Image (cartoon, rainbow, N blue to C red):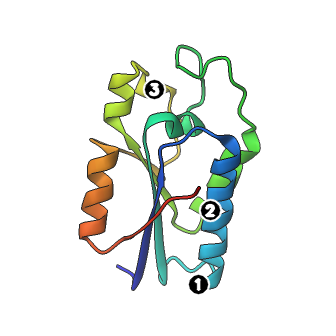
């Protein structure tokens, strides 16, 4: 219920690109003085982007990777201002990832489909933004 609403689409697994997205969200929020009553930002996450929101990468396509924990800490910092992560259940099923591996923060929400959620949010007036 704000005048400005934006979704950031994260379907990529590149940590530098994810870091850039977090910086863009931070910059975006700063214009509105980090006031969640003035701007609403959500990330819609599917495919390889999901790995940034898992506690444990074992048994996933990314099990040999190491992710800098500061990336998620930065997301947590943004969540204090109302930023949410919408995680695609189809990705969990397709890649056979146990949803219990997901971090337990309340600002993370499961959605039936990432791409369907992107379209739904756009229909509700959310501006679409994708980094890279």
56 sits left or right of 43 in the view: right
Q: Earlier in the sequence, mark 1 or mark 2?
A: 1
Compare marks 1 and 3 and give the one earlier in the sequence: 1
Mark number displayed over residue 78:
2
The residue tagged 3 is: 100
Q: What element carries label 3?
A: helix
What is the distance, in whole Å, between disc 1 and disc 3 at their CAs? 35 Å
In the image, what residue occupies the spot 44% across and 70% down? 6
List x then y, in percent, for residue 86: 41, 49
Residue at 53 percent across and 20 percent down: it is 61
Q: Distance between the residues labelled 1 and 2?
A: 13 Å
**Residue 92: x and y, percent?**
38, 28
Q: How far from the left and from the top, in percent, is residue 88?
A: 36, 40
**Relative to 121, does residue 100 appear above or below in the rendering?**
above
**Spot occupied by residue 17 in the image (x, y as percentages of width and height):** 65, 49
- SS category of the residue bearing label 1: loop
Circle 2 SS class: helix
Residue at the front extreme of this rendering: 132
């Amino acid at each position: 219920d704000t005048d400005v609403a934006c979704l950031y689409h994260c379907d990529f697994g590149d940590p530098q690109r994810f870091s850039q997205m977090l910086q863009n969200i931070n910059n975006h929020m700063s214009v509105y003085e980090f006031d969640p009553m003035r701007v609403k930002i959500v990330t819609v996450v599917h495919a390889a982007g999901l790995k940034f929101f898992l506690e444990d990468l074992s048994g996933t396509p990314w099990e040999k990777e190491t992710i800098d924990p500061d990336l998620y800490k930065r997301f947590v910092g943004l969540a204090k201002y109302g930023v949410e992560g919408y995680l695609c259940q189809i990705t969990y099923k397709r890649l056979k990832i146990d949803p219990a591996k997901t971090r337990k923060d309340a600002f993370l929400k499961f959605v039936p489909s990432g791409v369907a959620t992107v379209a739904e949010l756009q229909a509700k007036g959310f501006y679409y933004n994708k980094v890279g």
